[in-house]
Image (tube, rainbow, N blue to C red):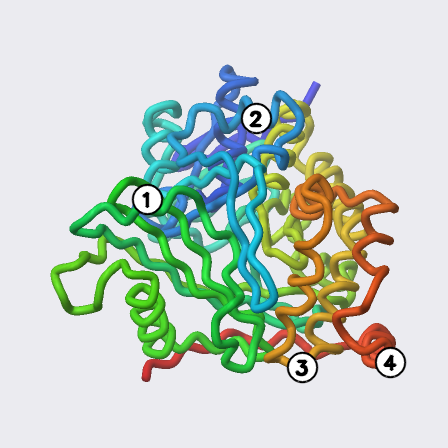
Amino acid sequence: MVARTKPSPADTRTEIAIVGGGLAGGLIALALRRLRPEIPVMLIEQGEVLGGNHRWSWFASDLAAPESAALMAGFRTAEWQGYEVRFPAYARQLGSQYRSLASSDFDASLRRELSQATIHTGRGVTALDAQGVTLDGGERISARMVIDCRGAVTSEHFRGGWQVFMGRHIRTRQPHGVARPTIMDAAVRQHGAFRFVYTLPLGANDLFIEDTYYADDPVLDRGALSTRIDAYTQEQGWGAAGSDDFEIVGHEAGVLPVITGGSFADYQADQRVDGVVMAGARGGFVHPLTSYTLPFAVETALAIAADADLPGAQMAALIEQRARRHWSRTRYYRMLGSMLFGAAEPDLRYRIFEHFYRLDEDLVERFYAARSTLPDKARILIGKPPVPVSKAIQALITPGRPLAAPQETRT
């Protein structure tokens, strides 16, 4: 029998309080709604919409378990059979099924499925603990279990580089004629980083174009990236900026850590709030090289729903242990990240992925899902190395650069 904390008369009471209505928090609320609908849940989000301003993409094979695919089945997604990659040395088409979800559709789906009593947007949180959450204005929500899904934080305990990106959704006046996504167009000027452009045809006249950099420094220069997207759009024949060839209907930008090493135990100790479950990117459930989060958010949501009767402190310990296993399991990808940032000249980093994308398609899928087999790992590393061996060895024995706070500039 689980002991209940008696609320004060001013308290709002729920069983499970989820702080942060992004991908991780929203999927936990959804999994609880579908698998344990009798449990009262509150999903608390500081912004006005769930999911913020993001787009999440994944391969269908990332969600190999039927229950994982089922959790995502209710969302309105864009889907394609096959995609392209481009490098200076070659271009290739692959047949994997690829999917993408916009945060606006994430918000709409959750609002359809979750009750009004569950979703609380526009509510900032000033404090949380194992017994509940304190909102801006002093309102207290007491809960048996508190789950912190407020997003990634920069930590001095991690080493690595950065993924800097800007995405733009355009609507062309004439059909653009693009049939499938280009996941990685690295046949572009590199600008002192591993740069590639990512393009999704969202409809006959809709394109999402994202300019991405694996950079040493966490600097988001909106002016420079916007100008480069303008140039790429014109080079591809989709229209000129400032003309009536297209209109801009959406955009996003950000800076994400690419973690190559550090102390996860020290990070957990810094972030831990005793008895509070830490999930999502804040909990460490990220692909360290690609920054993908969706497959891990789905798995964590289902794991929490499966043991939803546990006391909060036990769930916190369970998910923390799960995060440590994830950190251990993804060590190989941090090693590759070390070689990407430490062994390759910035303008030549694309050669690592140029080598990688020559490999078997199933291997590529397992890599993105962080399920590479031992033969996969060996196959990625054998053959003519895309970086000098001496520099690769040096990169692996060098701690790497501490992750500093992201910066933003305009030019």
In the picture, measured across the screen, residue 283 lies left or right of residue 105, that is right
- Front label number (2 vs 1): 2
Q: Is residue 140 above or below residue 77?
A: below
Residue 49, disc: 1
What's the residue at 32%, 50% (across, down)?
207
Q: Mark 3 or mark 2, which has the lower sequence index?
A: 2
In front of the other: 292 or 129? 292
What's the residue at 66%, 25% (across, down)?
65
Measuring from the top left, give residue 102's x and y in whole percent. 38, 43
Q: Is residue 248 above or below residue 363?
A: below
Q: Mark 1 or mark 3, which has the lower sequence index?
A: 1
Mark 1, secondary structure of its residue: loop
In front of the other: 256 or 237? 237
Residue contact between numbered discs 3 and 4, judged by CB atoms under 8 Å: no
Quadrant placement of the C terminus: bottom left
Q: Is residue 356 above or below residue 42?
A: below
Disc 3 marks which amino acid? Glu
Q: Residue furthest bottom?
A: 411
Q: Which residue is mark 3?
A: 345
Q: Mark 4 or mark 2, which has the lower sequence index?
A: 2
Q: Which residue is mark 4?
A: 390
Q: Is residue 17 above or below residue 209?
A: above
Q: Quadrant of residue 226?
A: bottom left
Q: Mark 4 or mark 1, which has the lower sequence index?
A: 1
Residue 69, disc: 2
Q: Mark 2 or mark 1, which has the lower sequence index?
A: 1
- Front label number (1 vs 3): 3
Q: Residues within 10 Å of mark 3 (few under 14, many from 20)?
A: some
Residue contact between numbered discs 3 and 2, judged by CB atoms under 8 Å: no
Residue contact between numbered discs 2 and 1, judged by CB atoms under 8 Å: no
Disc 2 marks which amino acid? Ala
Residue contact between numbered discs 4 and 1, judged by CB atoms under 8 Å: no
